[in-house]
Amino acid sequence: MAKRLTDTDKWKDDWYISLSNDYRIIWQWLLDNCSHAGICKRSIGILNMMCKTDIIENSLISVMEGRVIPVKNDWFIPKFLKFQYTDLHSNRPVIVSVRRELIRNDYYKLIPESFGNDYTIIPESLDNDYLIIKDKDKDKDKRKDKVFIGNKKNLKGSEIKNGKVYFEDGSAQLLGKDQSALLEMGELKPQDILQGSIS
C-alpha cells in the first residue's frame, strides 16, 4: 500500500471548493491512483465506475484546468510531482525512479516551467550510458551544472534477498527505507541500486 501526502489546505483553495462533489471525488481518485510519477491509466470508464459518476473526458480535462493532461493511454498530473517532492534532482531511489518513468514516457517535457529549475529534467546520454540532469539556467560551466545519476566506479546490485542487495564482488548491504518501499511496490530491481547508495 502506497502512502502519500495530502493537502489539508485544499479546503481553502478556491479552485477545489468550486468543484462539484463529483469532481472533488474524481480529483482525489486521480491522486490516489496515479503512479509515483503522477501518471494515471487513462480510462474514463474505470474512473466513472470507481467514482460513481457519469462524465465525459472533455469535461474532465476542461474542469481540471491543466491539472490533468491526456497523453496517449495516460493522464499526466504534473502538480502531483510538485506537491509530493521538493525537487527532482535528488539521488534518492524514489526520485531516481520518478525521473526514469518521466523520461521513459517523455512526460518530463510536460512539466510546467513555472515549477522552476528544481523540476527541470533534460536527459542527455553519456558514453557510459548514465543519465544526467542539467540545470538549463547555468550554461557557463557545463560540468558544474550537472547532477550525475549513478557513479561509474560503483557496482550495480545483482540480487536482492532478505532485505539486502548483493553485488558482483560478493559484498552486500542492507536496503534503505525508500529502497524497501520501492521494492515492495515492484519499482526497484537489483541493478537499480549502486554499491554505497542506501536511502
Image: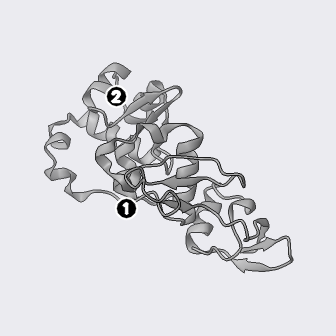
In the rendered image, the vertical position of residue 122 relative to residue 43, given as above or below: below
Say what amino acid the circle numbered 1 marks.
Answer: Thr
Question: Which label sits in the foreground, 1 or 2?
Answer: 1
Distance from Cα at disc 1 to Cα at disc 2:
33 Å
Camera-side residue of 130 and 21: 130
In the rendered image, the vertical position of residue 106 relative to residue 141, given as above or below: above
Question: Where, by quadrant of the figure, is residue 38 drawn?
Answer: top left
Q: Give the secondary structure at mark 2.
A: loop
- The disc at residue 86 is 1
**Which residue lies at the image location 77% right of the left edge and 79% below the top edge?**
172
**What x and y, as percent, mark residue 63?**
25, 29
Mark 2: few, some, or many residues within 10 Å (few <14, many ≥20)?
A: some
Res 56 visible: no
In the rendered image, the vertical position of residue 47 relative to residue 84, given as above or below: above
**Which residue lies at the image location 67% right of the left edge and 77% below the top edge?**
196
**Which residue lies at the image location 60% right of the left edge and 61% below the top edge?**
149
* Residue with the most extreme front position: 140
**What x and y, as percent, mark residue 192?**
69, 60
Camera-side residue of 49 and 24: 24
Left or right: residue 74 versus residue 184 is left
- The disc at residue 53 is 2
**Which residue lies at the image location 45% right of the left edge and 38% below the top edge?**
109
Q: Give the secondary structure at mark 1.
A: loop
**What x and y, as percent, mark residue 21?**
23, 37
Q: Are marks 1 and 2 in contact (CB under 8 Å)?
A: no
Say what amino acid the circle numbered 2 marks.
Answer: Thr
